[in-house]
């Protein structure tokens, strides 16, 4: 079992030693520790957007007396007369009791216990009183008493105020400004397709001039040379003698 769990009242029982009377005689209230508990309670609430609890003097006195009672008895227990001791017109009461060597350890034990954490973070509660008594061995006995008054009571809420409302828009004039009259210029003429052009016939080429003169007569062959004549004659005679 963890040390934190042992600090929870539901699971931790302190047994007084024979010297318990000595411890009780030297027990004293610890104001700074009480303020530390209140600060941690309200920090836990503020971190979750829950309003802080106001410290109530009557609840603080009741819590101190009960812590002294537990230190004297060296035993953790709840105050059975709590409802009768609160004289205010309360609507709801709750109580946490614990024992440990320091504030942080006891507060963490409360926050790790669903029942004790529920008291610390209860959104309906508005006031708190914390009593811390330190015995002769240096142990802290703590009682936290929570309350909600029937009237609701005042609360020192730590949640930031809501943002200021956005400025109202300028009033819209009831008479609308007339729109400018649109000019009605005649529409441009529709584009017309150009008339098809018939391509001009290409001029026929002029016939070439034909000359009607007869062609020149072929030139007469040149006369054979005498030597060629003799050869031809010899060939003729030879052919005939055959």
Image: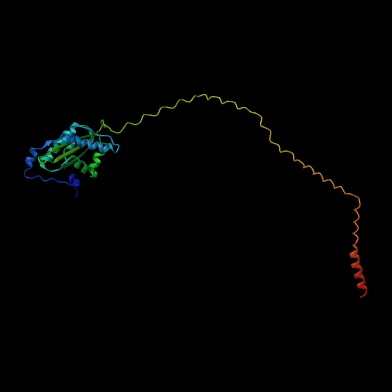
Viewer-side residue, 195 vs 62: 195
Viewer-side residue, 29 vs 223: 223
Residue 66 vertical placement versus 211 (above, below) = above
Viewer-side residue, 203 vs 134: 203
Residue beneath the point at 22% across and 42% down: 108
Residue 199 vertical placement versus 54 (above, below) = below
Q: Position of residue 228 (x, y in %)?
A: 89, 65
Viewer-side residue, 117 vs 192: 192
Is residue 3 visible in the rendered image? The answer is yes
Q: Position of residue 220 (x, y in %)?
A: 91, 58
Left or right of 74, for residue 236: right
Q: Position of residue 2 (x, y in %)?
A: 19, 48
Quadrant of the image for the C terminus?
Answer: bottom right
Which quadrant of the view contains residue 105?
top left
Q: Position of residue 200 (x, y in %)?
A: 79, 42
Chosen colour scheme: rainbow
Which quadrant of the view contains residue 135?
top left
Q: Give the number of callouts.
A: 0
Left or right of 111, for residue 222: right
Left or right of 83, for residue 228: right
Is residue 86 visible in the rendered image? The answer is no
| Residue furthest out toward the bottom | 242
């Amino acid at each position: 079992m963890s040390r934190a769990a042992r600090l929870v009242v539901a699971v931790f029982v302190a047994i007084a030693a024979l010297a318990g009377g000595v411890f009780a005689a030297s027990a004293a209230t610890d104001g700074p520790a009480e303020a530390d508990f209140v600060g941690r309670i309200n920090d836990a609430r503020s971190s979750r957007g829950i309003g802080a609890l106001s410290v109530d003097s009557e609840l603080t006195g009741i819590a101190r007396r009960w812590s002294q009672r537990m230190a004297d008895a060296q035993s953790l227990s709840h105050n059975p007369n709590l409802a009768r001791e609160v004289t205010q017109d309360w609507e709801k009461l709750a109580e946490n009791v614990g024992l440990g060597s320091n504030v942080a350890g006891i507060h963490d034990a409360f926050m790790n216990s669903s029942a004790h954490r529920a008291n610390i973070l209860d959104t309906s509660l508005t006031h708190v009183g914390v009593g811390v008594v330190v015995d002769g061995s240096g142990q802290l006995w703590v009682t936290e008493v929570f309350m909600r008054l029937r009237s609701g009571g005042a609360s020192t809420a730590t949640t930031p105020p809501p943002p200021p409302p956005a400025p109202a828009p300028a009033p819209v004039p009831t008479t609308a400004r007339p729109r400018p009259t649109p000019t009605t210029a005649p529409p441009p003429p529709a584009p017309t397709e150009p008339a098809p052009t018939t391509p001009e016939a290409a001029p026929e080429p002029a016939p070439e001039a034909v000359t009607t003169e007869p062609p020149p007569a072929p030139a007469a062959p040149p006369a054979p040379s005498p030597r060629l004549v003799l050869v031809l004659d010899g060939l003729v005679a030879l052919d005939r003698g055959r």
